[in-house]
C-alpha cells in the first residue's frame, strides 16, 4: 500500500487526483481499505485523465505496477507512480524526471519525442480505453453540432457517422495526416457554429447549477419550517401542562372540570395554528402561477422622478462657502467627527436657500376649511412652477 | 364652546371608530371609516394621560412631519382631532406591511417585485429627504402596503428635520438591525445617509428573505456588520475611530457580496454595495439611487397591483403602533418588559422566533 501524501514539486496544477486503492495512514482507521483517497495534485496538459462528477481525477493504481523503463516495481518502491505519455506508454515519475528534465526527448519505447508536461495520470487499467477517452473528448470539443443545426435527420446521421469515422481513425492511427486535415477543414468551416454551441453548453450547465442550488435552498427552508413548527407545538404543549397545574393549584373548582376545559382550549389553539400555517406549495408551482397571472396590466419602465420638484433648482445657486456663524462649529471640527458621521453643512445651507425660494409662486391660502391640506406648502403645485 | 372646540367637534363627527385592531405603549389603533363616504381609515388614539410631561415626543413628531408630507409612498395623515384627553390621528388604512410579506413563505418574489418595492421605498424616502426630513426608523415593519400594492413609509415617531450646524442629534435611533455603523459608534452629527443604510439592509432582506444583519446587542451589531462587510479601514472611512463611542470590535476580512447574494444581478449588487458604504458621505443618496441603472434596466419593476400580497386575514394589526420608541422616556426594566409583551401580542405569529428584534436597546448606552 502506498503512503504517498504528496507528489514532488514538478507536477503541480489544479486538478485534484484520487488514486485508486491508496490509503493514507491518517485516515486509514475510518475508511475502507480500497476507498480512493485524494493523493496529490497534478497538472494535465493532454487529455488530463478522466474527471468524475466532482471534477477530480481518479488515478489507476495497482500492486503489480512496474515501470517498463527502469523495471522498478511497487515492491521495491512503494511510492512508485506511473504516468502515461501522449504516445500511451507508462513510465514512473523518476524516469520521467531523468529523461525529460533537460527538454523534449524521445520516448524510450516508441521513440516519439515527448515533453515532461505531457504526462498524465492513468485512470483506466487498459491504456487503449485511456486513449479512446482522450480522443473522444478532443473530438467532442469541436464536433459539437446538435440535431437542430441540421435540416433533416439524414444529414445529422451522416455527420455523426463522419465524426465516428474520424474518431476511429485517430484511435487506431489510421491515416492520421488525412484525418487531421479533415478536422482542420471542419474547424475552419464551422468556427462560428462551434463557438455558439460551446456557449450554449456553458449556459445550460450554469442554469442546471442554479436550479440545483435553488432546489437545495428550498429543501432547507422546508426542513427549517418543519423544525420550527415542531418546536412551537412542543412549547405549546408544555405551556398547556403548566397552565393546568397552575389552575389546579389556585382554583377551587372540580379538578376534572378544569382539566377538560384546558384540554378543549388546547385543541382549539392547535386547530387555529394549523389553519394559520399555510400549506406549502413548491416554489416552482408558485412561480408558474405568478407567470400565469394576468398580463393585462403591463409593467412600466422606471421613471426616476415623477414630479417637477427640482424645477426650482435654477432659482438659486449655492456657494461653496458662507460666512455663517452656525457652521463655524463644522469648520472647527478638527477631529473630523462630523465628517466621519456624514454630516454635511452644505445640506443645512441648501435647506436655508430652498426654504427661501420654495412656494414663492404659490397663491395665498384662500380656503380655511382645508387648513390641514393647505399645510402642504412644501409640495410644488404643477400649475405654478416657474418655467 | 369656542370656535376651536366647535371645529374639533365637527372633525370628530367626520370619522367613525370601529373595532380596536392593535395597541402600542403610547397609542391604540382602531379601524375606522369616514362617516360620509365609508372610506376605510385607521384611527390612532394617543393616550395623553399616561405621560406626566405632556404629549409623547413621538406623537408630536408624527403629527409634525406627516402633516407636511404628502406623497404616494408616504402614509397619509388625513385628519387630527382631540377627544376628551386623547389626541386622534386619522391615517390611511393599510392592510399589510413588508415584514409580513417577507415572512410569508407561501409567497415567491421575482427580481422585478423586489425592484418595484425598492423603487417605491426610495421614492418615498427621497421625498422625505428633499423636504429635509430624516425618517430614522426604516425597516420592513414600517413599510406598509396598501390594497393596491403601493408601498408607503409609515411611523414617523422618530423622524426629525436635518439639524442646523452645531446642533446635536441623538444616536439612539433606528431599530438595531437597520442601524448604520456611524450611529452605533455614537455619532451625534449625521445626515440622510443613515436612512440609506437602512434601505440597503431592507434591500438585502428582500433578496435573502431573512434579516441581513441581525445583531443581538449593539456591540454584536457592529460585529455582525463587520463580519458581513469587512472591518473598515481608515482609508475607507476616514476618522471613524474618533467617533464618540468608538470601540474596536476586531478585524474581519471583506467577502464579496456575490458569495451571499448568488442570484442577484450585477446592477442590484452594485446598488446594494453603494447603500452599504461605510463612509456616510460617500453612501449613495436617495436621488442618486433613483437614477441607478438597477431601476432603469430590465426587467421593469412589477406594477404595484401585481405584487405578491399575503393571504388576507380577518383583522391585521397595524404594525405601525408597535411602539418601539416608547422606551425613550420610561425607565428600563418593568416598562420595557411590559411593552415587549404587548408587541408580541400584536405582531405576526412568527415574531416569537426573534424576540430581541424589534426593540431599540436604550439601556446599553445609558452612561453616554
Image (spheres, rainbow, N blue to C red):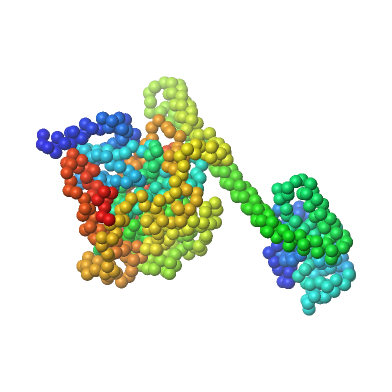
Taking B305 as reference, is A60 above or below it? below
Residue lying at the far left in this picture: please name it. Answer: B2
Quarter of the image where one finds residue B305: top left
How many labels were placed on the picture? Answer: 0
In-image side of A285 versus B280 (left or right): right
Taking A244 as reference, is B94 above or below it? below
Q: Nearer the viewer, residue A7 or B338?
A: A7
In-image side of A246 versus A86 (left or right): left
Q: Residue at x 23, y 60 (%)?
A: A352
Q: Residue at x 84, y 55 (%)?
A: A165
Q: Is residue A187 visible?
A: yes
Residue B226 screen position, x and y as percent: 46, 60
Q: Is residue B219 visible?
A: no
Residue B229 screen position, x and y as percent: 47, 60
Quadrant of the image for the C terminus of chain B? bottom left
In-image side of B260 versus B46 (left or right): right
Residue B100 screen position, x and y as percent: 43, 41
Residue lying at the far front in this picture: please name it. Answer: A151
Residue lying at the far bottom in this picture: please name it. Answer: A102
Q: Residue at x 60, y 45 (%)?
A: A215
Q: Nearer the viewer, residue A25 or A211?
A: A211
Residue A355 screen position, x and y as percent: 23, 57
Taking A79 as reference, is A156 above or below it? above
Taking B16 as reference, is B343 above or below it? below
Q: Nearer the viewer, residue A337 or A78?
A: A337
In-image side of A279 versus A245 (left or right): right
Q: Residue at x 65, y 51 (%)?
A: A204
Quadrant of the image for the N terminus of chain B? top left
Amino acid at each position: 500500500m502506498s503512503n504517498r501524501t504528496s507528489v514532488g514539486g514538478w507536477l503541480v496544477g489544479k486538478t485534484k487526483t484520487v488514486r485508486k486503492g491508496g490509503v493514507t495512514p491518517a485516515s486509514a482507521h475510518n475508511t475502507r481499505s480500497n476507498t480512493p483517497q485524494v493523493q496529490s495534485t497534478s497538472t494535465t496538459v493532454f487529455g488530463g485523465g478522466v474527471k468524475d462528477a466532482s471534477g477530480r481525477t481518479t488515478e489507476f493504481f495497482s500492486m503489480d505496477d512496474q515501470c517498463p523503463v527502469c523495471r522498478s516495481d511497487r515492491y521495491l518502491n512503494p511510492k512508485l507512480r506511473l504516468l502515461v505519455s501522449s504516445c500511451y506508454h507508462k513510465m514512473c515519475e523518476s524516469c520521467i524526471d531523468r529523461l525529460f528534465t533537460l527538454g523534449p526527448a524521445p520516448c524510450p519505447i516508441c521513440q516519439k519525442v515527448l515533453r515532461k508536461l505531457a504526462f498524465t495520470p492513468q485512470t483506466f487499467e487498459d491504456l487503449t480505453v485511456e486513449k479512446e477517452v482522450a480522443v473522444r473528448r478532443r473530438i467532442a470539443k469541436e464536433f459539437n453540432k446538435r440535431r437542430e443545426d441540421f435540416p433533416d435527420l439524414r444529414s445529422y446521421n451522416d455527420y455523426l457517422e463522419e465524426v465516428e469515422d474520424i474518431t476511429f481513425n485517430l484511435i487506431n492511427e489510421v491515416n492520421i495526416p488525412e484525418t487531421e486535415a479533415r478536422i482542420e477543414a471542419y474547424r475552419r468551416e464551422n468556427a462560428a457554429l462551434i463557438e455558439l454551441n460551446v456557449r450554449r453548453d456553458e449556459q445550460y450547465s450554469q442554469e442546471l447549477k442554479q436550479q440545483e442550488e435553488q432546489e437545495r435552498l428550498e429543501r432547507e427552508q422546508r426542513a427549517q419550517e418543519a423544525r420550527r413548527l415542531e418546536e412551537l407545538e412542543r412549547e405549546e404543549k408544555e405551556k398547556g401542562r403548566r397552565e393546568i397545574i397552575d389552575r389546579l393549584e389556585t382554583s377551587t373548582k372540580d379538578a376534572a372540570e378544569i382539566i377538560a376545559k384546558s384540554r378543549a382550549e388546547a385543541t382549539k389553539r392547535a386547530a387555529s395554528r394549523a389553519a394559520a400555517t399555510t400549506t406549502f406549495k413548491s416554489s416552482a408551482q408558485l412561480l408558474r402561477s405568478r407567470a400565469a397571472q394576468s398580463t393585462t396590466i403591463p409593467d412600466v419602465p422606471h421613471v426616476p422622478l415623477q414630479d417637477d420638484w427640482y424645477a426650482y433648482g435654477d432659482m438659486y445657486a449655492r456657494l461653496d462657502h458662507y460666512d455663517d456663524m452656525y457652521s463655524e462649529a463644522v469648520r472647527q471640527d478638527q477631529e473630523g467627527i462630523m465628517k466621519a458621521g456624514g454630516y454635511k453643512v452644505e445640506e443645512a445651507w441648501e435647506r436655508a436657500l430652498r426654504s427661501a425660494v420654495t412656494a414663492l409662486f404659490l397663491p395665498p391660502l384662500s380656503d380655511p376649511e382645508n387648513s390641514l391640506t393647505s399645510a402642504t406648502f412644501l409640495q410644488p403645485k404643477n400649475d405654478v412652477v416657474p418655467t | 364652546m369656542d370656535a376651536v372646540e366647535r371645529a374639533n367637534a365637527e372633525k370628530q363627527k367626520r370619522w367613525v371608530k370601529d373595532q380596536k385592531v392593535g395597541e402600542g405603549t403610547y397609542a391604540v389603533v382602531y379601524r375606522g371609516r369616514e362617516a360620509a363616504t365609508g372610506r376605510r381609515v385607521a384611527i390612532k388614539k394617543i393616550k395623553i394621560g399616561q405621560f406626566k410631561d405632556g404629549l409623547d415626543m413621538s406623537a408630536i413628531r408624527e403629527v409634525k412631519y406627516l402633516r407636511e408630507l404628502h406623497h404616494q409612498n408616504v402614509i397619509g395623515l388625513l385628519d387630527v382631532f382631540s377627544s376628551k384627553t386623547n389626541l386622534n390621528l386619522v391615517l390611511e388604512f393599510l392592510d399589510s406591511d413588508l415584514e409580513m410579506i417577507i415572512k410569508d413563505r407561501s409567497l415567491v418574489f421575482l427580481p422585478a417585485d423586489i425592484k418595484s418595492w425598492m423603487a417605491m421605498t426610495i421614492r418615498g424616502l427621497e421625498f422625505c429627504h428633499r423636504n429635509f426630513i430624516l425618517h430614522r426608523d426604516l425597516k420592513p415593519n414600517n413599510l406598509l402596503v396598501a390594497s393596491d400594492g403601493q408601498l408607503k413609509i409609515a411611523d414617523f415617531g422618530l423622524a426629525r428635520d436635518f439639524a442646523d450646524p452645531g446642533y446635536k442629534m441623538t444616536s439612539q435611533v433606528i431599530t438595531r438591525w437597520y442601524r448604520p455603523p456611524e450611529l452605533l459608534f455614537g455619532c451625534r452629527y449625521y445626515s440622510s445617509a443613515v436612512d440609506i443604510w437602512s434601505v440597503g439592509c431592507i434591500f438585502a432582506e428582500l433578496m435573502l428573505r431573512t434579516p441581513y444583519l441581525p445583531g443581538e446587542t449593539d456591540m454584536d451589531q457592529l460585529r455582525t456588520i463587520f463580519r458581513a462587510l469587512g472591518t473598515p479601514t481608515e482609508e475607507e472611512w476616514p476618522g471613524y475611530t474618533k467617533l464618540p463611542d468608538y470601540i474596536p470590535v476586531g478585524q474581519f476580512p471583506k467577502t464579496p457580496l456575490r458569495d451571499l447574494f448568488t442570484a442577484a444581478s450585477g446592477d442590484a449588487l452594485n446598488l446594494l454595495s453603494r447603500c452599504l458604504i461605510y463612509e456616510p458621505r460617500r453612501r449613495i443618496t436617495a436621488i442618486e439611487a433613483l437614477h441607478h441603472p438597477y431601476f432603469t434596466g430590465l426587467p421593469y419593476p412589477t406594477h404595484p397591483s401585481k405584487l405578491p400580497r399575503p393571504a388576507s386575514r380577518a383583522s391585521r394589526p397595524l404594525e405601525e403602533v408597535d411602539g418601539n420608541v416608547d422606551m425613550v422616556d420610561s425607565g428600563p426594566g418593568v416598562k420595557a418588559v411590559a411593552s415587549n409583551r404587548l408587541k408580541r401580542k400584536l405582531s405576526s405569529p412568527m415574531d416569537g422566533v426573534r424576540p430581541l428584534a424589534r426593540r431599540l436597546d436604550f439601556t446599553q448606552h445609558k452612561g453616554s
